């Protein structure tokens, strides 16, 4: 089987790495890829925002299966284009991809199908949104979300009326997110701990992948600006087998049934961003792809071959709802360019990559890297993910940081506390006994990764 992996991040490097090791996979082509995916796949230039170019490449390569990493081409309808030409692609249709590309679509859909989520109101006019945040309906904090894709920056958890009104004005009057913010969703602020559930879906059923938690804030202790993710660990100790059963029964099954019933069966990776509240799991958001950096810790834990699962799911014919997973936890530390997520320098030579990837229990996945004059240099904000695995989370953390320490480039930026909140679920750890009043019943106490609440909970 020949597989085309579309995207340029560490998530796509991890996909290409996993697929490239499997006996049923003859060749992996990564487009556009990076300096790391070059080691496991043939690379091809590609504009991922051009579905026709993606189809032309898949045609030219005679790819048996195309796997899409990022959300944008899916939101632009790349699956529909492939389906019309009878070429196999793993990813949802344009309509189903609205679970991510339109928060109003996702919320209305969840309301229609009784999927547990935050109370909400969709507003198309600024005066309506300003009245909603000022009125008694939601109280404070209140959450304001730009409807469309806003590169992870469209959500504000506003602690008070002034901040809420500012968020509405930013989106609707000052057009901060362009057309993506002309409609907003106002939401009740959920309280609890965040975790993510990932699944491979074939339109009817889902294969569950390891659960994970990411670290979205730039700096230690969950402070600083929101980023694409500075690190992740898997599995999430918060998602016990019982919680996972509830996620599948109360969320994943109704989502698949609902979309199939509306004529848009969901085939692709489904990422369920969850708040584990005192009343049970609630959906914060859906993404129609794997997370980044979550994929870098989730995929190495999957022991079964991925290609047959993705192919069967793309055809709507999965024969199982589970896959074989290692019990070894994985921790991924993102190495970013200094200044990220703000402005940063690129073109810095990277040293120590071979040294780091030679360590036991370590994988290095590339994101913003390229080869120039035989040297690997930085080209982006998130540059690499150093992944460590071990018998327990402590060993996984130790190995990820041992690898991170061997890699050098000018103005390297890393968080030093990735995975630490998972350590606190170890029985006997005192941090579980120190009554956190926000702690929902039935869940262990962890530092919050949430926007707008991290400063108060600094514990690093
Ligand atoms: P999103 O861009 O949808 O992933 O949202 C970013 C972050 O905002 C989430 O990871 C949560 O920390 C926070 N968030 C979003 N919606 C809510 C909500 N309804 N209640 C509390 N926090 C939320
Ligand atoms: N790490 C968050 C995301 O991929 O959306």
Image (cartoon, grey):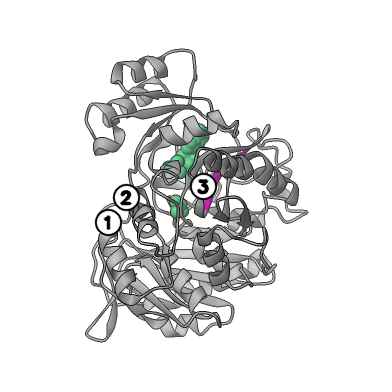
Q: Is residue 274 magenta?
A: yes
Question: Can you say whether 353 is above or below 180 in the image?
Answer: below
- The answer to whether the residue labelled 2 contacts the one labelled 1, judged by CB atoms less than 8 Å apart, is yes
Judge the density around disc 3: few (<14), some (14-19), many (≥20) Cα neighbours within 10 Å. Answer: many
Instruction: Report the residue marked by disc 1.
Output: 49
User: Label 3's element?
Assistant: loop
Single out the mark in the foreground, 2 or 1.
2
Mark 2 → mark 1, Cα distance in angstroms: 8 Å
Instruction: Report the residue marked by disc 2.
Output: 76
**Residue 456, how many percent across, how many down?**
51, 37
Q: Residue at x 34, y 51 (%)?
A: 77
Judge the density around disc 1: few (<14), some (14-19), many (≥20) Cα neighbours within 10 Å. Answer: some
Instruction: Report the residue marked by disc 3.
Output: 265
Q: Which residues are magenta?
A: 270-276
User: Label 2's element?
Assistant: loop
Left or right of 64 on screen, residue 253 = right
- The answer to whether the residue labelled 3 contacts the one labelled 2, judged by CB atoms less than 8 Å apart, is no
Which residue is more in the foreground, 260 or 45?
A: 260
């Amino acid at each position: 089987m020949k597989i085309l992996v579309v995207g340029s991040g560490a998530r796509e490097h991890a996909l290409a790495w996993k697929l490239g090791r499997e006996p049923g996979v003859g060749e992996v082509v990564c487009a556009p890829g990076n300096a790391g995916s070059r080691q496991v796949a043939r690379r091809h230039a590609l504009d991922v925002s051009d579905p026709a170019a993606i189809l032309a490449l898949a045609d030219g390569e005679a790819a048996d299966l195309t796997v899409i990493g990022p959300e944008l081409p899916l939101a632009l309808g790349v699956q529909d284009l492939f389906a019309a030409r009878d070429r196999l692609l793993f990813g949802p249709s344009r309509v189903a991809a609205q679970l991510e590309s339109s928060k109003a679509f996702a919320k209305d859909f969840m309301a229609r199908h009784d999927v547990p989520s935050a109370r909400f109101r969709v507003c198309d006019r600024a005066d309506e949104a300003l009245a909603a945040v000022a009125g008694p309906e939601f109280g404070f904090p209140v959450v304001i979300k730009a409807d469309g894709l806003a590169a992870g920056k469209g959500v504000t958890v506003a602690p008070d009326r002034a901040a809420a009104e500012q968020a509405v004005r930013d989106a609707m009057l000052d057009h901060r997110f362009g057309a993506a913010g002309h409609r907003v969703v106002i939401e009740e602020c959920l309280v609890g701990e965040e975790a993510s559930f990932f699944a491979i879906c074939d339109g009817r059923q889902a294969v569950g992948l390891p659960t994970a938690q990411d670290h979205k804030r730039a700096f230690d202790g969950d402070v600083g600006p929101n980023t694409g993710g500075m690190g992740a660990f898997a599995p999430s100790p918060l998602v016990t087998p019982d919680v996972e059963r509830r996620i599948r029964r109360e969320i994943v099954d109704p989502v698949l049934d609902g979309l199939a019933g509306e004529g848009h069966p969901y085939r692709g990776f489904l990422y369920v961003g969850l708040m584990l509240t005192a009343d049970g799991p609630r959906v914060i958001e859906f993404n129609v792809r794997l997370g980044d950096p979550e994929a870098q810790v989730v995929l190495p834990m999957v022991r079964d071959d991925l290609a047959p699962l993705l192919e069967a799911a793309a055809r709507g014919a999965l024969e199982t709802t589970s896959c074989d997973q290692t019990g070894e936890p994985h921790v991924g530390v993102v190495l970013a360019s200094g200044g990220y997520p703000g402005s940063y320098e690129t073109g810095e030579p990277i040293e120590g990559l071979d040294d780091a990837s030679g360590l036991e229990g370590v994988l290095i996945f590339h994101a913003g890297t390229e080869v120039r004059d035989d040297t690997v240099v930085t080209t982006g904000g998130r540059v690499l993910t150093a992944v460590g695995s071990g018998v327990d989370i402590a060993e996984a953390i130790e190995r990820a940081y041992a690898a991170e320490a061997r890699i050098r480039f000018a103005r390297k930026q890393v968080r030093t506390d990735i995975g630490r909140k998972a350590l606190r679920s170890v029985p006997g750890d005192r941090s579980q006994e120190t009554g956190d009043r926000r702690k929902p019943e039935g869940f262990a106490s962890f530092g919050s990764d949430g926007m707008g609440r991290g400063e108060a909970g600094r514990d690093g």
